[in-house]
Amino acid sequence: MKTLMGFIRKEMRQTLRDPRMRMLLFLAPCIQLTVFATALSTEARNIRLSIFGAPSDSSLQNIYRDAIASGWFTPAKVTTSDPYQQVQGGEADAVIVAPPGGLDKSIGRHEGHMQLLVNATNVTRGQSIERYMQAIVQRRTAWDFKPPIEFDVRVLYNPAMRTALFLVPGVMSMLVCLITILLTSMSITKEKELGTFETLIAAPVRPEDVILGKTVPFVLLGMSNIPLIVAVAYYVFDVPMRGSLLWLLAASFVFVCCTVGIGLLISTIAKNQQQSMMGGFLYLFPSVLLSGIIFPIENMPTVMRGFAYINPLTYFIELLRNIMLKGGDVNLMLFNIGILAAMAVLAITVSWRRFKTTL
């Protein structure tokens, strides 16, 4: 225990004595969470809308005014009267085209057909524009008919449909994963580059002490980021904490142990810090894309879903969203924490065996 504590003190001093490293550990995650959560959004806003029809067409003008008043659309500044050229030239994202003779006459003939031209080069934005316009038209024309079945929609856990409540837990997990994997993956390779690795393994210490000395400090540093990131999510983005903070800390601890084990495994493979950094990014990039942070796992092909379900980030994101937004289901939490614990044991065991064989 005395030898292990010496290793931990040495790693903590070595990591925290550089002011730039302290800023990277404690200040950068808060800034990144603020920037990412503010910039990333799945909502389509500031949609430039134009209309093609007569100014005297009151039905068309009412729909256009409702669209602008909704806050989703803004008036498009166009230089041509051709609706196709408005979209093609990038002057408008969507154009409402009245039927021949105008929408008023079309409604009088009990037809009410009009056309919506949508720029769908961005598929997600194009689909959002279509949904927004359908909702606006249905509200405007609801008094013309009574549907045979009515239902009341109740949105749970995110009634305001705020994107931040969905994205912030994902960004939180991504930042914890980024910090722990990159720091840990460079720990042993840094010793190799400085020439102190030979001194370290020649010392009268067990390999287990070296492994623990290289993992425990980064587990502590990773856990120290959790309160900071949760505070930013709660106070800056108003993300609720409906579940138990103890469950969140327990889930975070298991996840940090898992990512530290993966980082340690990368460090046993890499020969220098450059290789370890590249290995960390090669792991992080597909891990983030296949975790459900931005793209739903259910939309992925079957083969890719298989990779997503062996990704620790997938289970930690599910834990964060369940604990913070839903209050935490015990069975779900135990299941996901159990999988993360198994992954952590596997990563640390493989790292220990690789480290032991390279002594």
Image: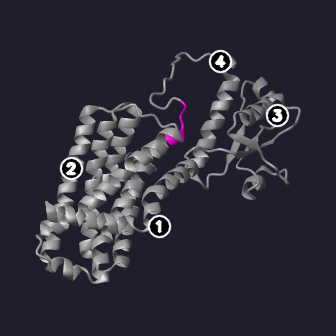
Give the image location of residue 354, x and y in percent. Answer: 16, 72
Between 233 and 280, the one nearer to me in the picture: 233
Q: Nearer the viewer, mark 1 or mark 4?
A: 1
Give the image location of residue 25, x and y in percent. Answer: 42, 59
Task: Pick out the residue farthest to the right.
Answer: 56
Three-letter amino acid code of the residue under disc 1: Arg
Q: Which residue is mark 1?
A: 20
Q: Are marks 4 and 3 in contact (CB under 8 Å)?
A: no
Instruction: Name the N-terminal-most of marks 2 and 1.
Output: 1
Gap between marks 2 and 4 measured at Cα: 57 Å
Instruction: Name the N-terminal-most of marks 4 and 3.
Output: 3
Q: Which residue is mark 4?
A: 145
Q: Which residue is mark 3?
A: 102
Gap between marks 4 and 3 measured at Cα: 21 Å
* Residue at the (48%, 39%) spot, across then down: 234
Say if 240 sits above or below 25 in the image: above
Instruction: Name the N-terminal-most of marks 1 and 4.
Output: 1
* Residue at the (13%, 60%) spot, across then down: 1
